[in-house]
């Protein structure tokens, strides 16, 4: 082996681990400040703000979890998983903030929802003075979080279900449970879900941590008085007074603790639920077949009526089996999800060119490109966004490839938990650590500090996206290449990386999208001197410039989508010019 | 309790696996379906159990035209869950997230808790596995797993049993024991059974054998 191999891997490790550890240590270090905790304890706002955080975070996580289970069950039973997953990439690429802005416009008193119902149903000739965009109950925030997290949970479940060995085994078990008399739905509940759910616990914690600590979405569509604790902490962090800043860091510490406690409680609940399901009463969810051995006992049937629960989909009448496959409909829930995303994106698109738009007209009276003209006038913002995203995605990709290519498996396993730090620590706390690090490096407010922040955030996503394909690469190709006398460089450049082109491009696009969506680190590390489409969109959302806000939010969606489109083009399969004879 | 099956055609959109198959199995008897691999014998079982859709997806999805009658009742379009036809696969397919006893309990029809537990204990004893209830299925030997799978299928009180090469994964000694075990249970319950195999040594009753032609 090359004598430089070990030092090289060690350097790579330090390159990633040092800033991650330093940031985490500095962030946690900020919590050792007794004055800050005293100030926090005396603050009258934070208990209610914490209550609001817990309510919105837990409610949205629970609803997203239930909805995911229902959608998966329906798709699995009807064998329509592929169709359910088709729309996912566009939904996943939608940044949280852009989605919140679009949803807020939809449900606002002057939004499409009420326009559609007025005046024929509601009788309104003017938008009612309802607090629907930043409702004090946090319902808008919950809705936005639920719709944004369902695609993520579905996607992580799909990565499990799309493994051939797992899917075939679960299909067989599902069929077997039916031969034992369980309805398709009940068979899913008792056999497939209990095996799938524990594998989704990690993603569930990520959803929970996000819901409890999100700032950008809460600023757009969350309650204002009191706001969630994350927003309150963010306001304190931006204060000119250093003592108030420390109080904000302490509030971030409270949030970190809340995430930990909720995750542990969730673990406990899941264990109890799984245990109870194992000893279940054996109800089949449908009438039992008659038995020759002993008379069937009358059984209580829960929930759905017998016929709908037990009739196989598309088989309500005695149809010949041959026609069965063509008649299955896409589940209602999947339609609803797709419709909400389509409506949100349409609201942003139309909103960005709307001029005069009196209530309750469904379409603007005049269309104008004014908003896009002002976006063009401040195109530096877009260039900053693109530059940061491209640079951080490239850095994260280069590092990930070098790491996966050279690092021993054991090292990789050790590093992984470190990489998840920026995902599980509340963003309000993470940026405190990042800022201290930037101060120490004398980078605060400068472009390299932003690049560092964005790269650290993109890194775990890029590595997670790339690792399965990269580590799953058939090692025999290397053996063939070596046996043909080719160098390693030749092998990498001419064989391995071209073959992995699609995975490489896709994970770079993931990193690009993550960078575009960054709000807190951009504002905080940039000391307000750097604007990206995301900071513009979120900051404008508080104001009244609907069309400009829509334009920036639309752009925030468009940039990552273009990134994914470019990745798909780069990773397209090679077209061979000579067709098979 | 006679099982009668008539399959006009069976296959996917691309190809027909077989056509014109007709047979009857009286209670307590075991019919053996023989055929080379690819002749569609497992698909015949799937058609009878109503699980054809689970075998393959998409363009390769299988379907059949014909009828399945059990004791004079038409089951052709009845959902699997309501057919009361048990199926024993080549692999025991014990649910990995449940203990041995929980696997058996899963099959017991609803009823008072104590009665259901008693049924499980009795089944364990019958399978010579008393005391194995709390074990992880993965810790059982191949023969033990096969017996649990059969007991699980029987605990659901099926009105007919289908066996898809259930002996092929067992070595010669175990195979003989398990064969006797299975056929005894079928006879004592008086239910019709269909066995699919490619091995002549597995034939249950030499007077009831049906040879499937090679798919053409």
Image (cartoon, coloured by chain):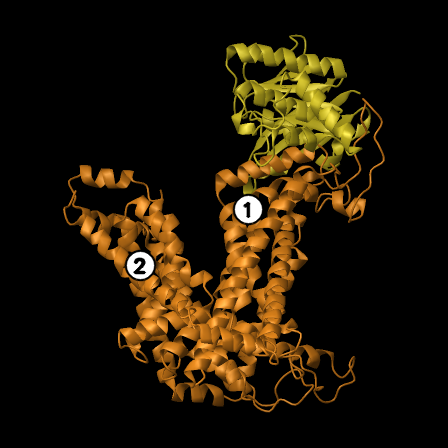
Chain colours: A orange, B yellow
Q: Nearer the viewer, residue A351 or A191?
A: A191
* Residue depicted at x 73% and y 30%: B108
Measured from the top left, where is residue A26 in percent x and y? 36, 68
Q: Label 2 belongs to which residue?
A: A17
Look at the image and tell me whether residue A486 can be seen. Answer: yes
Q: To which chain does the residue with label 2 belong? A: A
Where A253 falls versus B105 (above or below)?
A: below
Q: Nearer the viewer, residue A334 or B212?
A: A334
Residue B75 appears in view: no
- In the rendered structure, the answer to whether residue B103 lies left or right of residue A516 reads right
Of the two numbered discs 2 and 1 on the same chain, state the one appearing first in sequence: 2
Q: CA distance from mark 2 to mark 1?
A: 29 Å
Eyeballing the image, is A361 above or below B46? below
Closer to viewer: mark 2 or mark 1: 2
Give the residue at x 31% y 74%. Answer: A438
Q: Position of residue A444 (x, y in %)?
A: 31, 78
Q: Residues within 10 Å of mark 2 (few under 14, many from 20)?
A: some
Front residue (pair A546, A239): A239
Mark 2 and mark 1, same subunit?
A: yes
Query: Is disc 1 surrounded by few (<14), some (14 to 19) or many (20+) residues within 10 Å?
Result: some
Secondary structure at badge 2 equals helix
Q: Which residue is under mark 1?
A: A198
Residue at 20 percent of width and 53 percent of height = A8
The N terminus of chain B lies in quadrant: top right
Q: Residue placed at 52% from the left, 75% from the top?
A: A40
């Amino acid at each position: 082996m090359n004598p430089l191999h070990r030092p090289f891997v060690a350097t790579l490790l330090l390159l990633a681990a040092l800033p991650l550890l330093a940031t985490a240590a500095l962030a946690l270090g900020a919590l050792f400040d007794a004055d800050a905790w005293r100030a926090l304890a005396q603050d009258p706002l934070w208990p209610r703000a914490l209550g609001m955080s817990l309510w919105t975070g837990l409610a949205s996580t629970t609803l997203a979890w239930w909805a995911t289970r229902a959608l998966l069950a329906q798709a699995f039973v009807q064998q329509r998983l592929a169709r359910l997953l088709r729309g996912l990439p566009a939904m996943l690429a939608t940044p949280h903030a852009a989605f919140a802005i679009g949803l807020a416009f939809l449900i606002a008193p002057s939004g499409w929802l009420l326009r559609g119902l007025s005046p024929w149903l509601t009788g309104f000739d003017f938008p009612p003075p309802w607090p629907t965009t930043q409702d004090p109950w946090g319902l808008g925030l919950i809705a936005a979080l639920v719709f944004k997290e369902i695609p993520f949970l579905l996607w992580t479940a799909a990565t499990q279900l799309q493994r051939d060995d797992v899917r075939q085994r679960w299909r067989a078990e599902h069929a077997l449970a039916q031969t034992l008399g369980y309805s398709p739905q009940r068979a899913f509940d008792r056999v497939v879900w209990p095996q799938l759910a524990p594998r989704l616990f990690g993603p569930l914690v990520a959803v929970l941590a996000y819901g409890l600590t999100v700032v950008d979405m809460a600023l757009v569509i969350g309650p204002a008085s009191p706001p969630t604790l994350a927003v309150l902490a963010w306001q304190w962090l931006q204060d000119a007074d250093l003592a108030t800043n420390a109080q904000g860091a302490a509030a971030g510490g409270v949030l970190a603790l809340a995430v930990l406690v909720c995750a542990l409680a969730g673990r406990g609940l899941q264990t109890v639920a799984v245990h109870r399901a194992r000893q279940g009463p054996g109800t089949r969810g449908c009438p039992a077949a008659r038995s020759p051995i002993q008379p069937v006992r009358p059984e209580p049937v829960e929930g759905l009526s017998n016929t709908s629960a037990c009739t196989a989909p598309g088989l309500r009448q005695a149809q010949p089996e041959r026609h069965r496959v063509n008649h299955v409909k896409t589940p209602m829930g999947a339609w609803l999800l797709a419709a909400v995303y389509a409506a949100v994106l349409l609201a942003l698109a139309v909103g960005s060119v709307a001029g005069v738009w009196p209530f309750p007209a469904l379409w603007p009276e005049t269309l104008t490109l004014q908003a896009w003209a002002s976006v063009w006038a401040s195109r530096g913002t877009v260039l900053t966004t693109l530059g940061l995203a491209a640079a951080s995605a490239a850095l994260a990709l280069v590092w990930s490839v070098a790491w996966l290519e050279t690092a021993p498996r054991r090292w990789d396993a050790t590093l992984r938990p470190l990489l998840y730090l920026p995902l599980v620590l509340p963003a309000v706390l993470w940026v405190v650590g990042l800022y201290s690090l930037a101060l120490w490096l004398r980078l605060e407010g400068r472009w390299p500090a932003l690049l560092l922040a964005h790269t650290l955030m993109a890194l775990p996503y890029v590595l997670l996206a790339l690792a399965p394909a990269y580590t799953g690469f058939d090692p025999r190709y290397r053996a063939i290449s070596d046996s043909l006398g080719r160098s390693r460089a030749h092998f990498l450049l001419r064989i391995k990386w071209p073959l992995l082109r699609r995975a490489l491009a896709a994970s770079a696009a993931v990193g690009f999208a993550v960078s575009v969506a960054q709000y807190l680190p951009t504002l905080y590390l940039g000391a307000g001197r750097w604007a990206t489409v995301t900071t513009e969109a979120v900051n404008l959302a508080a104001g009244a410039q609907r069309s400009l806000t829509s334009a920036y939010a639309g752009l925030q969606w468009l940039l990552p989508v273009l990134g994914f489109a470019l990745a798909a083009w780069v990773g397209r399969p090679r077209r061979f010019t000579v067709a098979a004879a | 309790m006679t099982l009668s099956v008539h399959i006009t055609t069976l296959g996917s959109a691309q190809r027909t696996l077989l056509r014109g198959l007709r047979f009857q199995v009286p209670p307590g008897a075991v019919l053996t379906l023989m055929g080379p691999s690819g002749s569609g014998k497992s698909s015949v079982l799937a058609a009878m159990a109503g699980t054809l859709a689970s075998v393959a997806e998409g363009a390769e999805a299988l379907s059949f035209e014909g009828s399945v009658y059990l004791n004079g009742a038409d089951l052709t379009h009845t959902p699997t869950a309501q057919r009361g036809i048990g199926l024993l696969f080549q692999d025991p397919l014990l649910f990995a997230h449940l203990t041995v006893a929980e696997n058996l309990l899963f099959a017991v029809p609803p009823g008072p808790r104590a009665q259901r537990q008693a049924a499980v204990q009795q089944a364990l004893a019958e399978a010579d596995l008393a005391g194995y209830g709390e074990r992880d299925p993965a810790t059982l030997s191949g023969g033990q797993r096969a017996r649990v799978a059969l007991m699980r299928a029987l605990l659901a009180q099926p009105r007919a049993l289908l066996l898809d090469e259930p002996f092929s994964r067992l070595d010669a000694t175990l195979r003989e024991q398990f064969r006797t075990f299975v056929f005894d249970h079928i006879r004592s319950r008086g239910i019709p059974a269909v066995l699919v195999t490619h091995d002549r040594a597995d034939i249950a009753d030499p007077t009831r054998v049906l040879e499937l032609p090679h798919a053409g």
